[in-house]
Each structure stands twice: as C-alpha cells, then as structure tokens.
Amino acid sequence: MNNNLTREIEKYLLSLLDEQEDEDFIQLRRKELAEIFGCVPSQINYVLRSRFSPEQGYLIESRRGGSGYIKILKITCSNPEQKSEHISDIIGDSISINEAKRLLEYLQDRELITGRERLLIEIALKESDNQAQINDIDIATRKEINADMLRHMLTSLMLIES
C-alpha cells in the first residue's frame, strides 16, 4: 500500500479522534472512508491493523455488512492498576521478541517507561530467549516465557510509579 495514502488515512482518523471532546472513540463506515480516499476497503483495514493496534493504544471494533461500522477506541489509563491491566491484556499469554520490542517502543513513546527501562527489559528478554534457545526450548514455550517476564517487569514498574 502507498505509504503516503497510509499516512493520510492515519492523520485523518487521528484528527477525528482529537476532535472528540466527550468520547475516546470514533465510529465510521469502512466503505465511506474508502470513498473519501479513493481506495478499496481492504486498504482501510491495512491502516487499522498497522496504525491502530492495541500496542499503539487503540482497540478496533468492527461489524461487517450493510449496517456495518468501524469503531476506533483510544485506550486511556489514568491509574497504575488500569495501566497494568491494559499491558497484561496486550501481552496476552505469549509474545515474540519483536512484538515485545514494538510494545516497549510504544510504551516509551507514551512516556509510560523510560528509554533506560526499555533497553533493560529488551536486554533481559533477549538474554532469556538466548538461554531458552541454547536449552532447546520450543518457540511456543519461549513466547510464553517472554510474556510472563514482560508482564512481571512492566507491572512492577507501574506499581513503583504509584
């Protein structure tokens, strides 16, 4: 997909979210959005998947069909418990090293962790993954270990903040 078009659609959606005063979401129709930008609906799906993921602070609710819609919800966390729950939900039961790095970058960008904290966590995850490879632990189990470690480290950081 054309990067310029992706950026334009993203900017448009972000501006709609910013315009919302009382709500942290927008609701629109995929087909109408595609018509505005002169593209096919699958290109809208690409933007939603790549620029509005939970790791980036958004939840997407979608219903297809004639009366279908897309709802983009901006996740806001005002206290440490909410932050921990949100992070735990994003991490899930397993996470790859690359997914963890993207999540850590997002958290640093939102100033939920510092660059130093991000680097320390990345090093710990990488070292743990290396040891798991040496011990011939399968990929699925390594991803579960990554998720557990990441969840514990980030939760601990969130509790220290409070």
Image (tube, grey):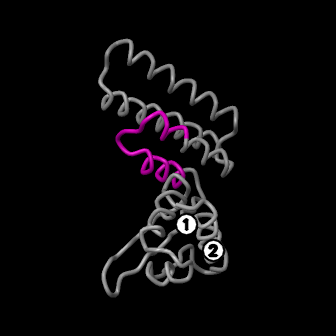
As drawn, the label of residue 43 is: none
59 versus 87 height, above or below: below
Amino acid type assigned to the residue bearing label 1 in the image: Lys
Pick the front one: 67 or 37: 37
Residue 9: x and y in percent read 59, 70
As drawn, the label of residue 12 is: 2
Amino acid type assigned to the residue bearing label 2 in the image: Tyr
Near mark 2 (Cα within 10 A), the count class, few <14, some 14-19 or many ≥20, is: few
As drawn, the label of residue 74 is: 1
Residue 19: x and y in percent read 66, 79
Q: Quadrant of residue 68?
A: bottom left
- Which residue is located at x 46 percent, y 51 percent? 85
Q: Is residue 63 left or right of residue 59?
A: left
- Which residue is located at x 50 percent, y 71 percent? 72
Pick the front one: 16 or 43: 43
Asked if the residue under mark 2 is in contact with the one under mark 1, i.e. CB atoms within 8 Å, the reply is no
Q: Is residue 129 left or right of residue 139?
A: right
Q: Main secondary structure of the magenta part?
A: helix
155 versus 19 height, above or below: above
Disc 1, SS:
strand
Residue 104: x and y in percent read 58, 41
Q: What's the CA distance linking mark 1 and mark 2?
A: 15 Å
Which residues are the magenta region? Answer: 81-101
* Residue that sits furthest to the top in the current view: 134
- Which residue is located at x 62 percent, y 27 percent? 120
